[in-house]
Image (cartoon, grey):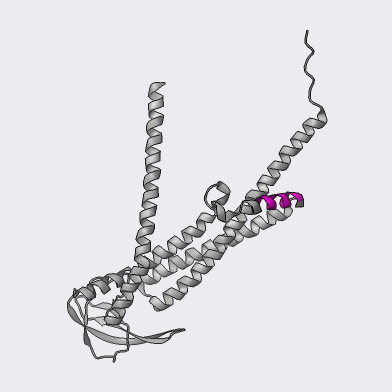
Amino acid sequence: MAAPAEDPAPSAVGSVAAGVDDDSRVATTVRLLHRRRGWAWTAGGSLIALVAFFAIGQNVSPNPTGAISTIFAVIIIALVVLFLAALFIVGLDTARLRRLHPADRASAARRVSHHPLAKHPFRTPQHRPSHAFVWVLITLWIGLAVLLLPDQVNAVAYAAGAGKTVDFDPQSYYQSCSRGGCSDYTEGILLTHPPVSATWQHYAALGHPFPVRQPVWDGWGSPDLMDGTSVGRSILASLIFDVPTLLILFVLARKVWRRLGRGRHTTVSWAAQRRSS
């Protein structure tokens, strides 16, 4: 009769359990390091996007009104909230990392240095926060494209000779200054039915209406009136912003279509398995 198998030595069982526990702690530390790095990139990207948005907005639309001011406010609030949230998560993960054992942090740091985040930013769950940085840039770019869309439409219409001639009644001035100098703008009323608030992107004598080309689209607020200089600037902006935006939307639509296709394929396969069983 064969002798019963002996139980493993208690010391061996303890060492195996300790090794598994050590690996689990190190893996947790690696996830924290990756997540902190991803959210640090997100905080930096949000701050850069916020500064860039202010700079571009001041040059493109220095005195936003109506719906344009609402779009400005929504984008700015979203960037500020994302920056503060990323900063909070970075601080929280840093505090959690400091409470871990120094040996676990050292071992995790060696693993992270061999597999930097830049090499695989979207492959595993611990890298998902880095998606936020990409979405910040995408949202900012699409937001600016939407913001500039009325001026682009009116610029193309002006270049094509569309729109009728109406009178513009100047009523007030404002000045916008940047590193390139200061520019004078004239706000007034387009004498249409009904009248529409508009902006002439130059100086004009108050109380002396003059003929301008009526915009084909009033846009998000008071439209900017076009002339040869503003037409060239708006068409250039359309090339800079609209082409990448269309490419981004095309890529996103393809991704959504592929995911929907995979979902339908999974559903059909599951239904076929149920019928066969």
Question: Which percent across, then down, holds residue 137?
Answer: 46, 62
- Choose top left, top right, bottom left or bottom right for residue 98: bottom right
Figure check: 145 above or below 116: below
Q: Is residue 142 shown left or right of residue 19? A: left
Vertical relation: 52 (above or below) 4: below
In what quadrant of the picture does the C terminus appear? top left
- Check residue 213 for magenta coloring: no
Q: Which residue is pictured at 38% across the width and 29% down the height?
A: 271
The residue sitting at the top extreme is 1
User: Which of the 4 image quadrants contains residue 167?
Assistant: bottom left
Please indicate, yes or no, whether residue 203 appears anywhere in the rendered image.
yes
Q: Can residue 61 be seen by looking at this rendering?
A: no
Residue 202 at what x, y percent from top left? 32, 86
> Could you tell whether 82 is left or right of 102 in the image?
left
Question: Hey, which quadrant is residue 188 in on the image?
Answer: bottom left
Vertical arrangement, residue 120 with respect to residue 206, above or below: above
User: Which residue range is magenta in the image?
Assistant: 103-112
At a point 38% along the width and 36% down the height, the residue shown is: 265
x 64%, y 60%: residue = 91
